[in-house]
Amino acid sequence: MSARNILVINCGSSSLKFALINQAHSQPLLSGLAERLDSPEATLHWWRSSHIREHLALPGADHRIALEHLLPMINDACGGRLHGIGHRVVHGGEHFTQSCLIDDAALQAIRATVTLAPLHNPANLLGIETTLNLYPQLPQVAVFDTAFHQSMPEHAFRYALPEQLYREQGVRRYGFHGTSHRYVSQRAAEITGLAVGDSCWLTAHLGNGCSTCAVVDGQSRDTSMGLTPLEGLVMGTRSGDVDPNLHSHLARTLGWSLEDIERLLNHESGLLGLSGLSNDMRSLEQARSQGHRAATLAIEVFCYRLAKSLASLICALPRMDGVIFTGGIGENSPLVRGKTVFYLSLLGLSVDKVANARCVGGVTGEINPPAYPRILVIPTNEEKQIALDTLTLLNS
Ligand code: AMP
């Protein structure tokens, strides 16, 4: 059978990211994004393997119009041979423990999880419904951010709250970034010659959103994100863990509404809130090198909290085969990796300066000195994992 082509789609409320992946190519044949959809500034950006970027203004375009403009480009890039579509879906609740072919029952179950991810799942559904209309003959697959973490034991996923809230309202820890944690832990096993089913990793996905995960024998046993992607680490604009009483404190002392507090914790906190400067680690590293006090503190808090999270996840491992850094920050910041590992020296972890400096810009490698526990930098590839899941389901 010749190599097949899969279109991977990640729909946000006003954006649509896509990648056309061919089984035989390491790079997507075509990728890009449509942004600011439903506004006068809507624009479609795309680039082929050549990386030459092109764009087209689509004033007022919605997801459907953007996809309609994409159709001829996709057909052109794959010679009219598209075999399936894989969709990223943020929340699969407890219903989805793995990726699935999209049929009426799956659609209904995804709709039923909207209350758990009111910002994300409706956008994901919009993408699915649009492509089902445009490509009714093609098999489509949903790949859930939460599914990988459904293997967590109950003592890891339950909050210390009355059981009724869990049973009736689904209040529990779900975890996110599962596609990335799964991909890099499988790559780590591949690279080190260990079997996925007999290997234990701590993974740190550090992008705009950040989370850690304990992966045992190919399964998530605990993770830092919870009911929503706000729990856990310091992120670009998200606070991560705060005292839950902060809500009532702010409401009582400042008269803030729920919306004010949600905006604070999700969009004005994290690296941005601490530094008062930027949510972007590159800008903060530059400011730190020029002596900016708040940027220096933001990086220190980020690394310390990350180290604390990794140390706590040791509780979920029977042994440790290595720590993995991934995501924009994890793949590119020797400073963050070095500082984080410094806080973990009691676990016997250490970083080799030269190897650490070398692993940037998509370079995979070990950054520990010889004879120390493994620390790996592994570029994540969620699009590839979604395409692989889609191909697996097409074969089944
Ligand atoms: P992602 O969401 O995975 O694209 O990651 C975005 C984050 O990666 C942002 O905070 C970027 O500043 C950070 N990042 C990307 N490149 C670098 C770099 N060379 N050094 C430090 N941080 C980087």
Image: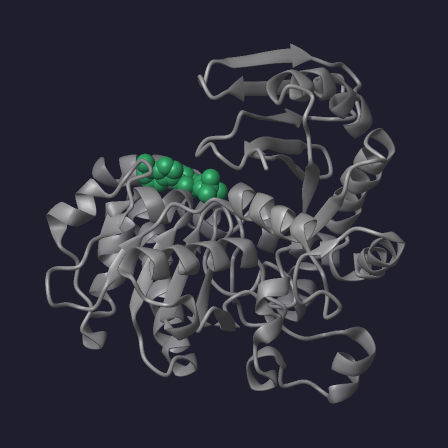
**Quadrant (top left/top right/bottom left/bottom right) for the C terminus:** bottom right
Along the line of sight, the residue nearer the viewer: 178 or 36? 178
Q: Is residue 192 left or right of residue 4?
A: left
Q: Is residue 202 left or right of residue 54?
A: left
Q: Is residue 219 left or right of residue 174?
A: left
Indicate whether 108 appears above or below 34. below
Residue 30 lies, in percent from the top left, at 56, 24
Query: For ligand 1, which image quadrant applies?
Result: top left
Q: Is residue 177 left or right of residue 334?
A: right
Residue at 62%, 52% (x, y): give it: 392
Q: Is residue 301 visible?
A: no
Q: Quadrant of residue 352?
A: bottom left
Residue 34 lies, in percent from the top left, at 66, 25
Residue 129 lies, in percent from the top left, at 84, 40
Indicate whether 353 appears above or below 40. below
Along the line of sight, the residue nearer the viewer: 204 or 143? 143
Residue at 55%, 54% (x, y): give it: 179
Residue at 20%, 54% (x, y): give it: 367
Q: Quadrant of residue 78?
A: top right
The number of numbered discs placed on residues in the rendered structure image is: 0
**Quadrant (top left/top right/bottom left/bottom right) for the N terminus:** top right
Q: Is residue 189 visible?
A: yes
Residue 211 lies, in percent from the top left, at 48, 59
